[in-house]
Amino acid sequence: MPGGVNSPVRAFKNVNGTPIFFKSAKGPILIDEDENEYVDFIGSWGPMILGHSNPIILEAIKAQLELGTSYGAPTSLENKLASIIKSQVPSMEKLRMVNSGTEATMSCIRLARGYTGKNKIIKFTGCYHGHVDSLLVKAGSGVSTFGLPDSPGIPKELAALTYSCPYNNIEALSDVINEIGGDLAAIIVEPIAGNMGFIPGEPQFLNALRELCDKNDTLLIFDEVMSGFRVGLGGAQAIYQIQPDLTALGKVIGGGLPVGAFGGKQNIMDQLAPLGPIYQAGTLSGNPLAMSAGIALIETLIQKNPFDELEKASSELMIHTKNLMYEKGIPFSTSSIGGMFGFFFTENLPKNFEDVVKSDDEIFKKFFYSALNRGIYFAPSKYEAGFISSTHDQSILDLTKSKIEEAIKEL
């Protein structure tokens, strides 16, 4: 495997190290191949919101295993999960299951272009929307001007159709929209960004996106692959009270199995085949194992609604860390919403990718390894968000705080 991994961030390249290989996980704990235990603050990048190996989800998967793993044909499970999602995210009047967040955002872009008859896209520097050719431009965590691709293999002609603007900057966005003129198909954004660390969109910025899209007959796409069912039941759009035209989901809605979904206004979604001319397909889309796991997880989230407690837990941990850093004279800023959080080695909380780049790389690496050596597993990059689960109880938080205290003494 290139780099020994199947996804680049796992390679520990951002911290100049060698990845840890894991063999099992339970609740908030990861266990590596050498039987070392770690308190996990990655949670498989989102879906382990109820902790690893949750019995409710495992039972749902086991029950479906007895019935078969895949049919390549419709099941009632797809309808059930779609209905549950729609009940919590009403902007998704119709939706379609796919197998990854990348598929979801890719399909949103194709649908937006087909529906509007326009070609150009605006995204925001540091927002990562999967490794889609037209979206791998100034893409944040996995890669990091105008119209220049972030990766070889992407034609410049295709990348030139994508404009990248600074996040949380309305003035720069307005200038680019004026430059594009009448050929803007969509604006795509992570309303709560998780790929340049954890940076929430400012309310006035996100509201401006909605107004500008309406004014220019352009579709607004919310990439909630990370934030969907992670910051709250209705995702970021419920927190900000903004309805996008299309939404991409992933991670959580599969309960830990590979899954994604995209959806939006009925008149837009009805342009998809077989009803309309815009083609999108997937042999394993709506896989019954992933649907079963997703139903079990989201039904439990609706029942328990743990998001306030998750935010309280992550805030307690991060504020404790911030106080210890300040005692050491180390600049540190942090924020959290629901089950997502982030921290930066900078005095002021970053508002965009450019701010994150300026944060201290060396102190991040030292802190990462100092914590890791004590069994605290944060994301191996300053460009990634953190995740907490309902199994991170007070005893786990207290343990983590004591280990972080030890780690900071080394800095």
Image (spheres, helix red, strand yellow):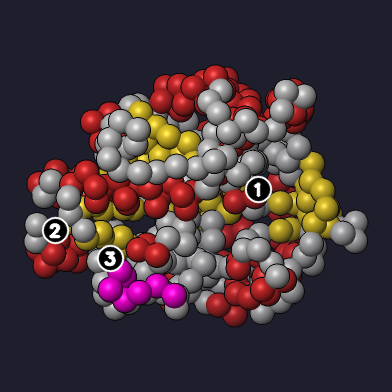
- N-term mark: 2 or 1: 1
- Give the left or right position of residue 376, taking residue 224 as reference: right
**Disc sitting over residue 162 in the figure:** 3
Q: Looking at the image, is 75 positioned above or below residue 364?
A: above
Amino acid tagged 2: Asp
For the residues labelled 2 and 3, the Cα–Cα distance comes to 11 Å
For the residues labelled 1 and 3, the Cα–Cα distance comes to 32 Å
> Which of pointers 2 and 1 indicates the residue nearer the eye?
2
Amino acid tagged 3: Thr
Q: Local crowd at mark 2 within 10 Å, few (<14), some, or many (≥20)? A: some
Q: Which residue is mark 2?
A: 183
Number of marks in the image?
3
Highlighted magenta segment, given as a residue range: 153-159
Q: Where does the image place residue 292, in percent across and percent down from the top left? A: 63, 27
In which quarter of the view is residue 241 placed? Answer: top left
Q: Which residue is mark 1?
A: 43
- Give the left or right position of residue 223, taking residue 5 as reference: left
Q: Residue at x 52, y 47 (%)?
A: 100
Foreground pick, 21 / 154:
154
Q: Where does the image place residue 85, in percent across and percent down from the top left? A: 46, 27
In magenta segment, residue 157: yes
In which quarter of the view is residue 133 placed? Answer: bottom left
For the residues labelled 2 and 1, the Cα–Cα distance comes to 40 Å
* Secondary structure state at the residue bearing disc 3: strand
Q: Where does the image place residue 182, in percent across and percent down from the top left? A: 9, 57
Q: Local crowd at mark 3 within 10 Å, few (<14), some, or many (≥20)? A: many
> Which of pointers 1 and 3 indicates the residue nearer the eye?
3
Q: Residue at x 43, y 46 (%)?
A: 104
Q: Where does the image place residue 188, in percent across and percent down from the top left? A: 31, 53
- Give the left or right position of residue 152, taking residue 210 as reference: right
